[in-house]
Amino acid sequence: MKLRAIGIRRFLQVSSSLIILGLLVEIVSLMWFHPLAFVLFAFVGIALMGLGIFVYLASLVFAVSPPAENHE
Amino acid sequence: MVPTGILIPLIALTIVLAAVFFVRPSITRETTGKILAFVGLCVLPVLCIATGMSTHMQRSEQTKFCISCHSMELYGKSLYVDDQKYVPAQHFQNHRVPADMTCYACHTDYTIYGPMKDKLKGMTRIYLQYVSTPPKTIHMSGGYSNLQCLHCHAGARNFEENPVHLAMMDSLKTNQLSCISSGCHDTIHNTSEVTNLKMWGPAQ
């Protein structure tokens, strides 16, 4: 499937799910008082959120917008 | 430590907004929806990352954070040795450094990127602990710099007027003569002896 063929809805769903997962990881890392909590946040949480942001930004460039409504 | 202040409401708000776009992505058809999507899927997550990083950095400055690592337990215990010859113990027990940031106060590099360098060194130790083989004896890379002592002691009257210090001030300031290996203040953590020593009250 070509990137342009993917609708903006799919992009937004993937982006938001990645961001939610990243934020859940961040919450776990903040509740866990251990040096590994930083590793979890830095390598898993930030990676998931960063990927989510990237997918959202990619949607602005590549996604096919839904057809405009006809107001005539 | 449970993070308070802005971080938890910020994370909650971001999760709610992201969930809205997961369930109803079609709201981005309207201009308001597009703006909300930019805020919820770009601006707020970036703020969450920055605030989370800042919280983690502040948390790693705490004494209890450092000694939560198994290999640091004896170093933490050495802060409670009931012997004023032990440099870390006398600094900790007499609050010459903030008690909740004792390790950080004496081991950080007081430069603009000091905390970042410390974090990278900490990551190396985590790698050694969990992936590679941890060394039997922990050594500080590059040794202990006098600058960390002088950060507080330089300019202090009892340090500057001490005739022993006066005689070697230049060597101390240029790090040619170490404060801790010169036979002057050489009783540091001594972790091999800590378990056999008398401890100060709060440790018992």
Image (cartoon, coloured by chain):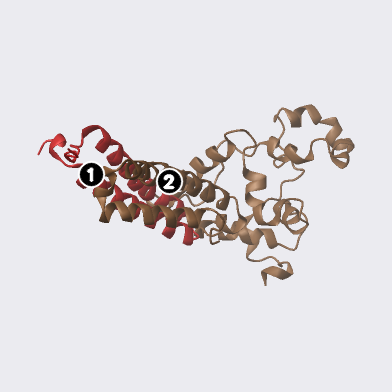
Report the residue at 29% width, 41% height from top: A56
Residue A2 coordinates in the image, percent (x, y): 11, 35
Residue A61 coordinates in the image, percent (x, y): 25, 32
- Rendered colour, chain A: red
CB contact under 8 Å: marks 2 and 1: no
Q: Which mark is residue B84?
A: none
Q: Which mark is residue A11?
A: 1
Element type where label 1 sits in the image: helix
Residue B1 image-quadrant placement: bottom right
Q: Amino acid at mark 2?
A: Leu
In the image shown, does B109 or B132 lie closer to the viewer?
A: B109
Disc 2 crowd rating (10 Å Cα; few below 14, some 14-19, many 20+) is: many
Q: Which mark is residue B44?
A: 2
Question: Considering only vertical position in the picture, is A69 above or below A29?
Answer: above
Residue B133 coordinates in the image, percent (x, y): 40, 50
State which chain is coloured brown: B
Disc 1 crowd rating (10 Å Cα; few below 14, some 14-19, many 20+) is: many
Q: Amino acid at mark 1?
A: Phe
Residue B154 image-quadrant placement: top right
Residue B111 image-quadrant placement: top right
Query: Badge 1 sits on which subunit?
Result: A
Alpha-carbon span between mark 2 and mark 1: 18 Å
Residue B48 placement, left or right of B64: left
Report the residue at 30% width, 37% height from top: A57
Residue A17 placement, left or right of B107: left
Residue B193 coordinates in the image, percent (x, y): 64, 60
Q: Are marks 2 and 1 on the same chain?
A: no
In the image shown, does A48 or B194 lie closer to the viewer?
A: A48
Query: Badge 2 sits on which subunit?
Result: B
In the image shown, does B176 or A18 lie closer to the viewer?
A: A18
